[in-house]
Amino acid sequence: MIELFEKTGIMSVGSRLRLLSETVTRDAAEIYRLYGVAIKPKWFPVLYMLYYGDDCTVTGISRAIGQTHPSVSTIVREMRCAGLVVDSKSDDDHRATSVRLTEKGEALRSPLRQICDDVRKAVESVEAAGHPLWEAISDWESQLAEKSLYERVKAIRDRRENSNVEIVDYRPEHHAVFKRLNIIWINSHWSLEAHDLEVLDNPERAILSPGGHILVALVDNRPSGVVALCRMDSADYDFEIAKLAVDPEIRGVGIGEKILRAAIEKARELGAKKLFLESNTLLKPAIGLYRKLGFIELQDYHPAYARGDIQMELTL
């Protein structure tokens, strides 16, 4: 097993910590037997809280030791069967279960204190080698509480994926992917409408000729996202943000945000003062992105599509 860890390195951090935990837990069981204390290692945090904690309800104990309510309830049940505790409904809150030590449980306080002192000295002898594990664990816990390992990995992946993204102007050879991505997107939630096909079948006539613009996101030179700026015949708005679609195989890595930001910047270059878009509130990630980039919801709206139930604007 150690050979595997040496080969895989930090990728096996979870497995290695789990193996270390299992080793320490086995030793803990042997230590308790050595001192003639008949408890399971997993009972110790609960016992400690019953000796020194303020809130001796199952809820209070679970919160203090960072374990789930069902997990602590199981431990309390096992300790009750061993004659160490009794539990009952709290006098203050009948929904809460209070736990208290029996005489037998209280009698373990002194030997457990001695075990703790001896274990502390043993751990210090291990850490004398120059690798303070306890401090390292605390540092890891603090760092991961601030930003989880999942969030850190996702951020790295997003940066890598986005570093391979290039936003380019639409060209005639992009017509097929512009149509395909939008059809996939619309059909995954609703059904194509007649106006969709008018635009998708001939974007040059429907979008570009009236003064609009289309951008394409290339991921490793592969067209993977599209968005259109449709010129509006309106005194209030210059362009409508429309036909935003991303290849479903690479959603979730920030392509949509990157191409939408590019579209907003392009609108500024074209002299736009205000943008408009229409969407659906079921698309929570999309609505969240629009709000993030400064779009605000219109109170009165008149949807152009049957699927539309929200309209938004952005002042540039």
Image (spheres, helix red, strand yellow):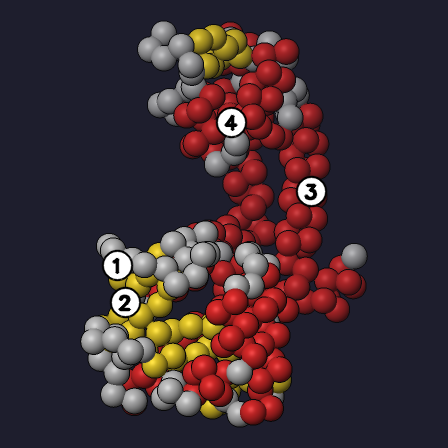
Q: Nearer the viewer, mark 4 or mark 2?
A: 2
Secondary structure beneath dot 1 equals: loop
Q: Are marks 4 and 3 in contact (CB under 8 Å)?
A: no
The crowd level at tag 3 (other Cα within 10 Å; few <14, some 14-19, many 20+) is: few
Of tags 1 and 4, the one toward the viewer is 1
Cβ atoms at labels 1 and 4 below 8 Å apart: no
Q: Which residue is mark 3?
A: 22
| Circle 2/circle 1 CB separation < 8 Å | yes
Distance (Cα) linking label 2 and label 1 = 7 Å
SS at mark 2 in the image? strand
- Which residue is tagged 1? 298
Question: If you read the primary sequence from the N terminus, does the residue marked by circle 4 or circle 2 appear first?
Answer: 4
Q: Which residue is mark 4?
A: 69
Q: What is the CA distance from the residue labelled 1 to the residue labelled 4?
A: 45 Å
Residue at mark 2: 313
Q: SS for tag 3?
A: helix
Label 4 Cα crowd, 10 Å radius (few <14 / some 14-19 / many 20+):
some
Do residues under tags 3 and 1 come within 8 Å of each other at their CB atoms? no
In the image, taking residue 236 as reference, residue 69 lies left or right, namely: right
> Vertically, is 273 above or below 269?
above
